[in-house]
Image (spheres, rainbow, N blue to C red):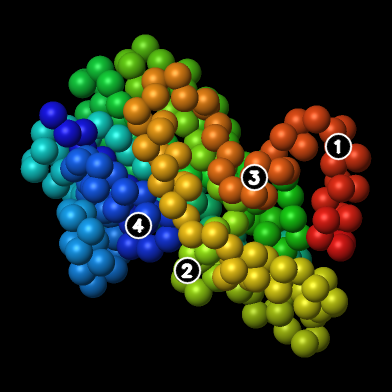
Amino acid sequence: MSKVVLITGATSGMGLASAALLANEGYRVYGGTRDQSMSDLHAEGIKSVYLDVTNSHSVKEAVDTVMQNEGRIDVLVNNAGYGLVSTVEDGTDKEMFDQFNVNVFGLLRVTREVLPHMREAGSGVIINISSFLGKMGLPLLTHYNASKYAVEGITDSLRFETLPFGIRVHAIQSGLFGTNFVKKGLVVNPDTVSENSPYKKLVSHFVPIVADAINEGPKPEPIARAVQRIIEDEEADIFVPVGGEAETFIPMRKEMDDKTFEKRVKETFGL
C-alpha cells in the first residue's frame, strides 16, 4: 500500500521537487499550498490541499481532508518557510513575529495536528526542512537564522516525545539551491536596504552574495532525494546536510572551536 505524504509549501522549490519525486515513485502525495492556482501540482500527479500554516483552522481542515480521503498520514514534510532580510536594529515587531509564525509556529501547528493520527497508527515519519543556517549565523539573516535554530531544537526534542509511538523525526539541513526563494521566499526590510542605512556597506556586499548563490545554485532535486531516503531508511541520520554550504560548514562547525569557526566564516564571506 502506497504511503500517504503531506508536504507544506509545495508549489515551488524544494517542496514541489520533493512532492513530484515522491508522486513519481508511487507515494500518494498531498501538496499543501496557499496558492489558488494549483495546476503545477496536478500536472505532477500531486493532490493539492489548501493549507495556510499560520492559520490553525486551515491546518485542521487540510489534515482532516487528507484523513477523510486516505484514512492516514504516513509522512509529514514541514517545508513551508521564508527568509527575512533585516538587521536586528531595523526589524519590526510584525516582521519578527511573521518570520517565526511561518517557519516555527507554522511547523508546530501542522505537526500538532498530524501527530494524533500517527500516534494512533503507531508509526510515521516527520521531516523538517531546516538549513545550514540552523547551525551557524550570517549577517542580515538573524531572524531567519533564529527560526532555523528553533527548528533544529524542535527536531531534537520531538524525537524523544514520539519515540514510544514509533514515529521518527528528522531534519534536512539545506544549503543554497536554485529555487524561487529570492523572488518568493525573501522579505526585505526597507530600512535595511535604504541608501541612508548605516549598514549600507554590509548590505551592498553581502546581499548579492546570497542572491547569486540562490539564483545560480543547483536545482533542489538533492533535497527531494534526501526526503525519499529518510522515509525509506529507518536508520537514517537525525540531521541530514544537503548541498554545498551545508556539507561544508556543518562538519566544519563541529570540528572547530567557536572563534576559529567565526574567523573562517568571515574569510569565506569577506566580512
Left or right: 147 with respect to 127?
right
Image position, residue 55 (x, y; %): 32, 55
User: Which circle's residue, 1 or 2, is located before the other in the chain?
Assistant: 2
Compared to 111, does 176 lie above or below? below
Farthest residue to the bottom: give it. 195
Farthest residue to the left: give it. 69
Cα separation, mark 4 vs mark 3, equals 21 Å
Kind of residue at disc 1: Asp
Image position, residue 8 (x, y; %): 34, 51
Q: In the rendered image, which residue does mark 1 sit on?
A: 258
Cα separation, mark 4 vs mark 1, equals 36 Å
Q: Tell me the quarter of the image containing the C terminus.
A: bottom right
- Image point (58%, 63%), residue name: 217
At label 1, counting other C-alpha atoms closer than 10 Å, the crowd grade (few under 14, some 14-19, many 20 or more) is: few
Does any portion of residue 138 appear in the rendered image? yes
Cα separation, mark 1 vs mark 2, equals 33 Å
Q: In the rendered image, which residue does mark 3 sit on?
A: 246
**In front of the other: label 4 or label 1?**
4
Q: In the rendered image, which residue does mark 4 sit on?
A: 16
